[in-house]
Structures are given as structure tokens and as C-alpha cells.
Image (spheres, grey):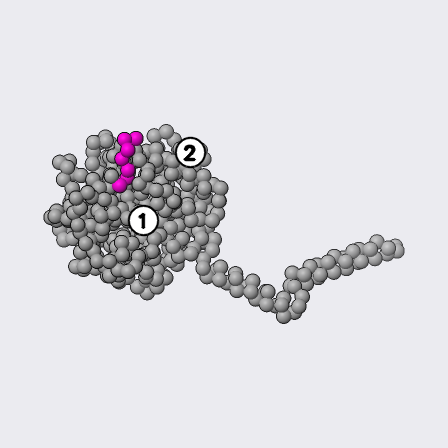
Amino acid sequence: MTTVRRGATALAATAVLLAGGAGAVAPAAHAAPSPAPSPSTPAVPAGLYGAKDPTYDGVWRQSLAFMAQQATGVEPAEQAVAWLLGQQCDNGGFPSFRADTAGDCPAGKPLDTNATAVALQALKGVDSHEDRTRRAREDATAWLKLVQNHDGGWGYNPGSPSDANSTALVVSALAAVGEKPGSVRAAGGKSPYDALLTFALPCSAKPGGGAFAYQPEKDGTLRANDDATAAAVLAGLGKHALVRGVTPDQEPTCVDAAKPTAERAARNGAAHLAAAVAKSGHLDLPPMPGATTTAAQPDVGNTADAALSLAAAGHREAATRAVTWLEGNSAAWAKEGGPAAYAQLVLAAHTAGADPRAFGGADLVAQLNATGPKPASTPDTRERGEAEKEETAKREEESGFPFWLLVAVFLVAGIGVGFLLSGRGGKRKP
């Protein structure tokens, strides 16, 4: 899976796409915290991570939180798992969020390939609601295959043109649950990797050689997009966000092959990212249209995604450079962004070999856990439980008399005394 980020900006782009028809092209999503709740927005339901309006990212942030917890040995609360399961529609797809889960999703409810993909992967690693999560994964996998585009890829919503981010996210999710993404083919025989290759820029392109575009421009031009590149690198290598970095280190290279493959394109994308973070340790976020400043700003979210993808590709030096920058510069961004932001950092640290519990002096895992229901278990609570069991067993061994049997003896003795007193009371004379 890839930690492609979707805030209000991405959902607004989707709304434009849906309103404009299938021919419209949505712009690439940039980092944006969830919007603050307003009187007209739904209340945050129990079981959901984060305190902000979940309309645009409820399923997304819940799923990323689960995945980051899985990477660090945390089991989410049963209530939290039940909330995510309740978001799924009967056909297997997930919307970005639905407030009313009493019945099936209403007709016309937009379903979201990105939310479905991350929910699919997130539900693979939870322990509670075993039968429901198994069925949910099977249904989500079937739905994703059903809505695959003819070019082999996926768009944000079913029927929308394929984009690199959505296609990569689905590929990584399928890989995470044991599917073979290359074998998932559309009616015309195209695979997801065929679609990914259509978004890859050649190494000779200037600027952005080796990168991936989100979608082609209206004239067919491919414009490099770091968000799409980080996602496509992971997917092109057949990997997902819970992977660990590979060794030994590999030198980033960009090569235009006569017969391009998804793996070669992914490695070209990784070379692009490595060169980008080599300059400052971070990726840049271009100024948004209408912004008062024209200077590029550090892109924290995409830097985290890049660190994960670089580590997964074996470029540990570049990944470590990005992680080091994140340790010193991500705290305010993560606090504002909430559970999805904390999860991105946890996953990047996990893949790159850093400690998310000591990340720039912060415990990212504790901060993430604090945004939702108390976890069912953590490594600490399980360790204490095991220690208590060992202590009980030790006491039993030292006494030569099992502790549970001792308790049972006292209980039986107590019952006998009760009967004796009761019998004496019945024989008392008036």
C-alpha cells in the first residue's frame, strides 16, 4: 500500500471530476489536514480515530491508523474495528465516509477506490471480528476487481479515468492481502502495471526525469508529481506500506529500457525521489493557485511517503536523509493532521528502520493511539500480562500447590460453612 494522502483538496478535485464527467482531469492531491467541523457537518462517531470532520477521510484515516498500529504491534479496539466494518457497502466497496450505517449505502453514494484499498489492507491485520473481517476483505477485493478500468488501472471513483495514485494504491493493497496484481486483468487483458507505465516519464524528461505523473494533461503531456511517484514506486515493486527496507543498499539509477517494465519504471521513480531529497532532505510543495507566496514550501507528507518508498527500494541512505529531516520538522504538521499524519510518519519510520517510539524525541505510536479508542492491546500491556502469568506460575511452583486450586478450596470451604450455619439456624427452637 502507499500512503497517498487525501485531504479536502483531493476530495474537492473529485467533486469537480464527477461534475465535469469522465473526460475531466482531476489535479493531483496535495497535503491538507481534514477540514474543521462546522454546524452542518456530521459529528465524529464513537470508535473513529481523530476529532475532525470525517466526511472526506473517515475510512482513510481509520485504515491508516490500523496499519501503523500493526507495524508497531498494537491491536486496535474492537469498537474501532467494528466502526470500519460498518462503513462497507453491501457490494464490497467503501465510501470515504457514511454517517448512517443502519442499512446499505444509498443508491448514488460515491464509492472510493482509495478508501476501499486501504480498508482492505487494514482489515487484514486485525484480530477481532474475525469472520466479518474475512468476508469484508473478500468483498472488497471482488469489488476492486469489478471496477477496474479497461486500461488496467483505477480512478478515484468507479468510472473515472485511471490515475497513478489510485492504481498504485490498489496494487499495493492487493499485494498486501496475497493477490498477484499482475494477474488482475481488465476485460481487454490489460494489467495494473500496464496502466502504471502510461504515467511514467522517461529519464530524459526535463524536468522530472524518471518520475510519474498523476494523470496526463489535456494535451497528453506528463507532468512529474512526487505524490504519484512515491505511490507508484511502491506498487511497481509489488510492495506495500508494511514492508521493511531491503538490504544491501542499492545505488539509485534511471534507465530508459527498450521494453519498459513496471519494476524498471519504479526504480526510475525512486532515483527521481532520491535526487530530490538529496538537496535538502525533503520534497517541496509547489505554491497552490492563488497563494500569496510563490516560494515552494517543504512537503512533509510527501517526504514521509518518499522515505517509505526509498527504503522499500533499497535506497537506505536517501531514505535516512528524509527521515532525519522529518524527525526535526514534522511535529506541528502531524499534530494538525491527526491520525493519518501520525500514521504516515510511523509507517515511514518502520520501513526505513527508525524507531517511531523515539522519533525526534516523540513517541509517534502513543500520539497516534491517543487520537482514538484505547487499543485492545499493546506490546507493553501484553508484556505485563505475560509477566503476571509468570509470577503466578512461580508462586504456584514455590508453594507446591496450584494457586487456582487453593482458591477453589477456599470457595468450597466457604460454601460448606454456609450450609452448616444455615442448618443450625433451621434447628433453633422458638
Image location (x, y in percent) of residue 164:
24, 42
Q: Residue at x 52, y 61 (%)?
A: 385
Q: Residue at x 82, y 55 (%)?
A: 423
Residue in the picture at 19% in, 48% down: 211
Q: State the count of labels.
A: 2
Q: Is residue 117 magenta?
A: no
Which amino acid type is marked by label 1? Lys
Residue 84 visible:
yes
Q: Quadrant of residue 13?
A: top left
Left-right relation of 425 to 356? right
Q: Which numbered dot is residue 90?
A: 2
Q: CA distance from mark 1 to mark 2?
A: 29 Å
- Mark 1, residues whose alpha carbon is within 10 Å: few (<14), some, or many (≥20)? many
Q: Quadrant of the C terminus?
A: bottom right
With respect to residue 282, does 55 lie above or below?
A: above
Q: Tell us which disc is closer to us: 1 or 2.
A: 1
Report whether residue 304 is seen: no
For mark 1, give the secondary structure.
loop
Magenta segment range? 187-193
**Circle 1 is placed at which residue position?**
239
The foreground one among 100 and 319 is 319
**Direction top: furthest residue:** 107
- Is there a contact, CB below 8 Å, between mark 1 and mark 2? no
Q: Is residue 371 left or right of residue 327?
A: right
Amino acid on which disc 2 is placed: Asp
